[in-house]
Image (cartoon, helix red, strand yellow):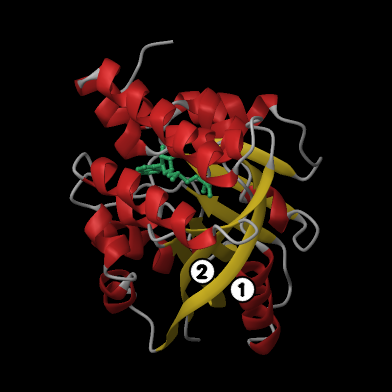
Amino acid sequence: MAMRSCDTQYNAVSYQKYRFSPPENLQKVIFSYLEEKKLAPMRLAVDVGCGSGQSTCILAARFEEVVGTDISEAQIQAAKETASFPNVSYRVCPAEELPFEDGSVDLVTAFTAAHWFDIPRFMKEVDRVLRPHGSVALSTYSPNFSMHYKDCSERLTEILTETQGVLLKYANEKVNRVIGDYKEVFDLLPFQDKRRVTQIIDKIPMSVAEVIGFLHSMSMYQTFLRSDPEAAKSLLQKTEERFLETMGVGSNETQLEIGIKNVCVLGCKGP
Ligand SMILES: C[S@@+](CC[C@H](N)C(=O)[O-])C[C@H]1O[C@@H](n2cnc3c(N)ncnc32)[C@H](O)[C@@H]1O
C-alpha cells in the first residue's frame, strides 16, 4: 500500500495498540446532550477522523448504523482488523468530502481529529449531511496530562510535562487549535444552537509501558522520530526510566492513572 502524507502523521500499529476510547465523562457529556436535544431516530452516526476505530465503537449501541471515516488508508485498515460490532463499518475519505447524501446523518462526531481538518470545508459538509435537528460533537483532549501514583503524582506529572515540552517543538501548527481549547472550532460551527464544554476531566488506568506507548502514538513524536530517530527513542527511554525511578518500581507494567482534560464542541442543526 502506498504511504500518503496523512499515513506518516501517525503510526497506525502504535495508534491501534495505545490509544484509548473516549473516556467516561466525555461520553456522558455527549450522550446527555443527545438526550437533551431528543435526538431521534438514531439511525446513522458518522465518526470522522476515526483512526483505528476506538472512538467509533462507542456509538454502536446507540445507533442503527455507524460509519467511521478517515483519510488514512493505514488507519482504516487497522480499524477493519480490530474486533468490532456488526453495525459498524469504515471508509477511507477526507473529512471535507463525506460520502453521504444531503440530510442523511443523525450525528457527526470527531474525537481528537477536527483540528486536523480544513475546518470551514468540514463544517459545510457537516451542515450538508446532517438532517434537520441532527447533532454534532467535536472533542479533543488538551496536551496537559497529569499522572497519579501514590505520593509521587506531582513529580511524575513534572517529568511528563518536560517530555511533552520537547515533543511540542515538533507539533504541527494545527495543534494550536487544541491548545486554544477548540475556540476556533466552536466559532466556525455554523449553527445557532451550540455550546463548548471545557474541563471534562477523566482518569484513565494505564501501565507505565502504556503511557510510553501513548506518547509514541502522538503525531508530534512521529515527526520527532522521522527528524532525529536516536534522540526521539532516547527521550522515551529516559522518560520511562525516570518514571520507574520516581515510583521506586522495576516493572514498566506497574499501573498508575493518567488524568485527561477534554473539551467538546456540541451543536444542533436548525429545522
Ligand atoms: C488523533 S487521530 C484520532 C483518531 C480517533 N478519532 C481517536 O479518537 O482515537 C486523528 C485522525 O484524523 C485523521 N485525519 C487527519 N486529517 C484528516 C482529514 N482531513 N480527513 C479525515 N481524517 C483526517 C488522521 O488520519 C487520524 O487518524
Nearer to me, 77 or 146 = 146
Pinpoint residue 172: horizontal percent, then vertical percent.
21, 44
Q: Residue drawn 43% across and 85% down?
A: 194
For marks 2 and 1 on the same chain, the one whose residue lies earlier in the sequence: 1
Query: Residue 247 lies in what quarter of the image?
Result: top right
Nearer to me, 217 or 76 = 217
- Amino acid type, mark 1: Ile
Question: Answer yes or no: do the residues labelled 2 and 1 have beta carbons within 8 Å?
Answer: yes
State left or right for residue 45 relative to residue 161: right
Q: Residue drawn 77% across and 45% down?
A: 87
- Amino acid type, mark 2: Ala
Q: Quick one: SS at disc 2?
A: strand
Pinpoint residue 163: horizontal percent, then vertical percent.
33, 43
Residue bearing mark 2: 137
Q: Quick one: SS at disc 1?
A: helix
Which labelled disc corresponds to residue 210?
none
Query: Residue 232 lies in what quarter of the image?
Result: top left
Which labelled disc corresponds to residue 30?
1
Q: Is residue 50 above or below residue 182?
A: above
Residues at marks 2 and 1, CA–CA distance in whole angstroms: 7 Å
Pinpoint residue 187: horizontal percent, then vertical percent.
27, 78
State left or right for residue 90 relative to residue 113: right
Q: Does the residue labelled 1 lie within 8 Å of ligand 1?
A: no
Residue 5 visible, this orientation: no
Nearer to me, 67 or 181 = 181
Q: In this view, does 175 lie above or below 126?
A: above
Q: Give ligand 1's quarter of the image.
A: top left
Q: Does the residue labelled 2 lie within 8 Å of ligand 1?
A: no
Q: Residue drawn 77% across and 57% down?
A: 64
Q: In this view, does 262 lie above or below 223?
A: below
